[in-house]
Image (cartoon, rainbow, N blue to C red):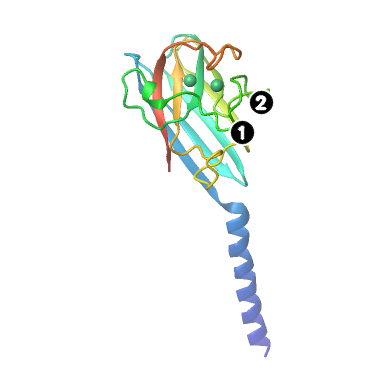
Amino acid sequence: MLKKTICLMAILVSLAFVSFEKKDGTTLSAISNIIPKNNSDISGTVSFTETNGIVSMTASISGLAPGNHAIHIHAIGDCSADDGTSAGGHWNPTNVDHGAWDSSPFHIGDIGNIEAGSDGTGTISRETDLWCINCSDSSKNIVGKAIIIHAGSDDFSSQPSGAAGPRIGCGEIELQ
Ligand SMILES: [Cu+2]
Ligand SMILES: [Zn+2]
């Protein structure tokens, strides 16, 4: 009897652990490998992980001119055009004005500016519950969209895209 009880308890504990893992322990990841556009020389990656409904992003780009360069999520995961225009406009499923991250209104693709130092490298990070990785909500799912890096900086006010100039890098966001 005692043996049976212990055995049953072991099964219950392991089941509880499995459901705990599903609810809280799952981490999804996605990546965008940046390829140069408009004859630029840039490269880099933008990586995304999602845990407990929060997506963390880190972009690491090199080959940039020193200073600020706009970085956005654009609506179409197609980097085939030499000038990057195949990626479409800013990802804006909520149909609001362009702006600065976390300062309404802003497109949920309006990541901001990446600042490159004298060595031509720059990084930027974001954490948000506005995005998801491969979920069924198309107004949140970043997979299949594109990261675009611009030659100029985003002024956070010009419509529809912050007057950030030509597209110098593009990478489709892919599930990892
Ligand atoms: Cu852009
Ligand atoms: Zn925008």
**Label 1 secondary element:** strand
Does residue 40 appear in the picture of this structure? yes
- Reading the image, the residue beneath label 2 is 102
Q: Amino acid at mark 2?
A: Asp
Percent x, y of residue 6: 65, 81
- Tell me if mark 2 has few (under 14), some (14-19) or many (20+) residues whose alpha carbon lies within 10 angstroms of its own: few
Query: For ligand 2, which image quadrant applies?
Result: top right
Mark 2 or 1, nearer chain start:
2
- Reading the image, the residue beneath label 1 is 127
Q: Is mark 2 within 8 Å of ligand 2?
A: no
Would you identify the image quadrant in which residue 84 lies? top left
Percent x, y of residue 19: 61, 63
Residue in the foreground of this view, choosing between 171 and 57: 171
Q: What residue do we see at 40% from left, 32% from top?
A: 77
**Label 2 secondary element:** loop
Do tag 2 and tag 1 residues touch (Cβ < 8 Å)?
A: no
Q: Is residue 119 above or below residue 108?
A: above
Instruction: Name, please, the residue furthest toward the bottom.
Output: 1
| Left or right position of 41 against 70 | left
Q: What residue do we see at 42% from left, 12% from top?
A: 166
Q: CA distance from mark 2 to mark 1?
A: 11 Å
Q: Amino acid at mark 1?
A: Glu
